[in-house]
Amino acid sequence: MHGLDTLDADSNDTVFRDVIMLALAGFVAIVIMLLPHLNPPGKAVKTATPPGNVIVEIRWPETLDTDVDLWVQGPKDQPVGYSNQGGLIFNLLRDDLGHRDDISKVNYEVAYSRGRPAGEYIVNIHLYRNASGTVPIPVTVIASLKKDPGSSAVPLATTNIQLATENQEITAFRFQLSESGQLVPGSIHTLPKQLRAAGR
């Protein structure tokens, strides 16, 4: 009698283990079948083309904790810069404060235009703050033109400016575009015009 109880217990244990193992195998099979659906393959994302037609960029050394400001003015429009970041033609898209509140090391500002209306464009740079104490501060200034959203930007003018004192504002260049959106030959010059005071 005692031997029959042992055989029944062993049979029950074997059946219990078999049921558990089958349930576990079924669960694993379901998980394996669901894996491809939990994280479907990514789809290719079309990259956005940079906005704007006239693109003005400035860059200065990453090692300097210096706040250099870009000021631009389009034809018959108000100056655009840190204190007035949007006009009818231009928008300042990046106002870089040097190392202050900056998770990147890049010292860079950029403004884009909506369209390319005919007339004069003015590009100024201004030294707002120089916490690094280094002088002069070299700044590269580039203006480019895109004829339409699908085309590549073509450089119009580029220069290197040296800023020496805080609150110094320098006209990097001025140029004119024709009615067809072309650079007017011989129109690039550096006759100074203050934009910051007018844009505040």
Image (spheres, rainbow, N blue to C red):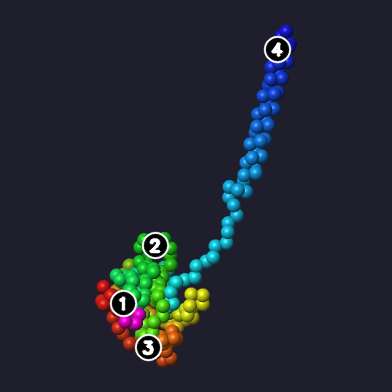
Within 10 Å of disc 1 (Cα), the crowding (few <14, some 14-19, many 20+) is: many
Q: Is residue 94 visible?
A: yes
Under circle 3, the secondary element is loop
> In the shown orientation, is residue 52 left or right of residue 36?
left
Badge 2 or badge 4: first in the primary sequence: 4
Contact between labelled residues 4 and 1, with CB atoms less than 8 Å apart:
no
Bounds of the magenta span?
Answer: 74-79
Badge 3 or badge 4: first in the primary sequence: 4
Of residues 18 and 195, the one nearer the viewer is: 18
Query: What residue does disc 2 label?
Result: 102
Of residues 2 and 178, the one nearer the viewer is: 178
Q: Is residue 175 visible?
A: no
* Residue 70 pos. (x, y %): 35, 74
Query: Residue 199 occupies which quadrant of the picture?
Result: bottom left
Under circle 4, the secondary element is helix
Under circle 1, the secondary element is loop
Three-letter amino acid code at the position of disc 4: Asp
Contact between labelled residues 4 and 2, with CB atoms less than 8 Å apart:
no
Badge 1 or badge 4: first in the primary sequence: 4
Closest to the camera, between mark 1 and mark 3, is 1
